Image (tube, helix red, strand yellow):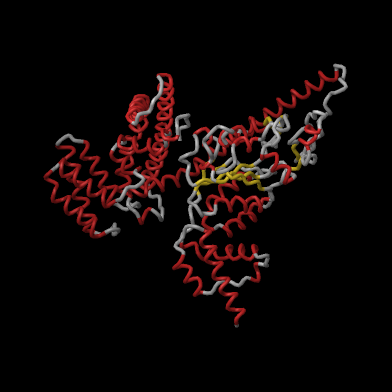
Amino acid sequence: MAFSSTPPALQIDSEAARRLLEPMLPRRLRACLAQDLRVASACSELALEITTLAPDAEALVSAWIGAVSSEGGLWRDRRRIARRSALIRFLDVWAVEHDQPVARALADVATLLSCAGDDRRAAARLAQPLWLEREAVLDLGKGFAALAEAQTRLTIGRVAEQGADSDITGATDLAVALQAAWHDALTDALLTFSEKTSSAIAAAAALACGADDAFASDVALVHALVPVGEILTRPVADSAATRERRRWKTIEAQLVKKSEARQREKAATVDTMPQRPDADAPPAEVHKGHVLVVPAIQETGSDRGKSIARGYEHIIGKPLPLVAVPDLADVRARLVFEFPYAQTMIDRLLADLIGREHATLRPTLLIGPPGAGKSRIVARIAHHLGLGLWRVDATRDAGASLGGLDRRWATSEPAHPIMAVARSGTANPLMLIDELEKAATRADHGRLWDALLPMLEPETARAYQDPCFQTEVDISRVSWLATANGVGNIPGPLLDRLRVLEMAAPIQADLEALLGPVLEGIAANRGLDPAFEAPLDGEAVALLRRSWRGGSVRRLTRLVEAFVTARETLAVRH
């Protein structure tokens, strides 16, 4: 999303930009990238376009529409194939005889709507046209300046019609902010379209060459290209992310060497100068596997100054241990048992720890519907990795609170990562920012989003200026995981620093796999050994299957709890 200082009523979201750009996409790509495309209605609209262009095709169009509506998903029915092929051949000939490339595009859209996702010939037909149309998508960015200016004028005009009073300077500032917001939102939308276009092209080429995907055989080609392409290109994205991590490791190593060299130069300079009576104490020796998170702080000599360090004596000026990476195979097995529907996301999170000595995860945003278990999976990851967990509720915690409060205030306190370090006694706790998209946008007391930015960058996190201790602290080993229902309200600068992973809600097919961990959780909450909690019988499972169609794990837990309680009540009566 674009990040601007415009009033909330005038904020520009990526969805508005997407709706503005989508009609400008080439015909084939517009069908592939439409998020809410329904095949039946799309076929009806296409039929009207074809008969308007070529009235002679009315009979062929009627036969094709009849086959699509009557036979549904029977992709390989001979009559359906024959009627589809007849219409496509007619449009191809029409395009050549009348020199109208649009007829060829309409034939390709008919192919997308009425061929199965695993149809190799259909995919081969579409691979090259989609590739050629990609250039047209990239060219859309050339007109963003004019488009943003036009949208800004429309918005300013609506505000003026509503009787908004503002001086010339205020109106100019608003126009500049709105135009920048529109330009950023359009750029973000174009980036999304470009990524999905690449996925569709990769899928068309791979399916044409014989690639096999179980999902593609059950859906129309128009619905298969982007998802299959995303699966095919995921290893490339992961490889790029791995290269980026290696690059950052190299940069971090260089920064460490420079820092050590500066410290040696400083120490040599201090040795040649007379020592002052009030010189700071030398830093404590830091052994391997430890980090000096908070160096010795400067006391003021007053009671207020002494109270700053009260409760944090065990971490100030003392190297703290880093939690080592446990057996990842065991951790994965435990997490997959508890969250069988999130296996892909678990693998991508744990991949950060492969080959590393100490447990530190990349800053990551988990998005998914309410009740999918995002917050709980973060808590269980912290538990199985042995990391201390510190939870921040973005709906009520302001940025000033997260980043720490100055020691001049009566409510002074260190930054939340320092409080997490103090509680866990380790240098690499895990921070959970819950419901990140719902953070307050007012800047009266500082925004949580703004406070997060320097904490997520390794270089600035290594020398974060804590306002309470008034010294540079090292929170670079702290892991950051955030949850959200979507990314629509999160500013672009923050999204740039977060890896976004989607956590889908479980479906009804996951019911049996979820019953074991749900029963274990219920037993643990009651202080009982899970081994003594008998599994549910077949009748109870059948009732659960009728009552729970998938979605919220919290609702499933409540239903299972009701069954367990009813079973215990009956046992006592008998």
Q: Residue 199 appears at what percent x and percent y?
A: 41, 42
Q: Residue furthest bottom?
A: 574
The picture quadrant where one finds residue 230 is top left
Q: Does 11 sit left or right of 296 as displayed?
A: left
Task: Establish if 82 lies above or below 406.
Answer: below
Q: Let me know if residue 139 appears in the view.
A: no
Give the residue displayed 51% in from the left and 54% down from the top. Answer: 372
Residue appearing at x 41%, y 56% in the figure: 214
| Residue 409 position within the rendered picture, expressed as x and y whole percent measured from the top left | 69, 32
Foreground pick, 227 / 312: 312
**In the image, residue 429 above or below residue 511:** above
Q: Quadrant of the N terminus?
A: top left
Residue 310 in the image, given as x and y percentages of width and height: 78, 39
**How far across and how far down the image is residue 181, in percent?**
43, 29
Decide if residue 138 is on the left or right side of residue 299. Answer: left
| Residue 452 is at least partly visible in this image | yes
Task: Determine the image quadrant of residue 153.
Answer: top left
Q: Quadrant of the C terminus?
A: bottom right
